[in-house]
Image (cartoon, grey):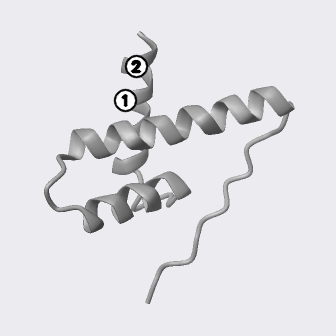
Amino acid sequence: MARKVLYRTVINIISASSYQPTRFNDFYQMKKQSSQSKGTKKIAIAVMSRLSRTIFHLVLNNEVYEPTVSQPKQ
């Protein structure tokens, strides 16, 4: 169940990236451009891992998520 929730969360983050860019979308796009042979599902799973580590850190340290968007590369 948790895997489904994380996967759908990542897919929603990626699809909403044109309206609300995030670090997770930047990571997804970087992975997608760097490795042409990997499938998009494998890259989404890597983003799921990063998201779960971020959530774990926030819960463990009792912090609030402050989204900071990295600047677009030019």
Quadrant where the N terminus is found in the figure:
top left
Q: Are marks 2 and 1 in contact (CB under 8 Å)?
A: yes
- Which residue is found at the position 60% from the left and 35% from the top? 53
Give the residue at mark 2: 3
- Which residue is found at the position 44% from the left and 58% from the top? 27
* Quadrant in the rendering for residue 65: top right
Residue 16: x and y in percent read: 40, 51
| Amino acid type, mark 2 | Arg
Asked if residue 30 lies left or right of residue 37, the reply is: right
Quadrant where the C terminus is found in the figure:
bottom left
Asked if residue 10 lies left or right of residue 56, the reply is: left
Give the residue at mark 1: 7
Asked if residue 4 lies left or right of residue 73, the reply is: left
Q: Nearer the viewer, residue 31 or 7?
A: 31
| Amino acid type, mark 1 | Tyr
Q: Nearer the viewer, residue 19 or 52?
A: 52
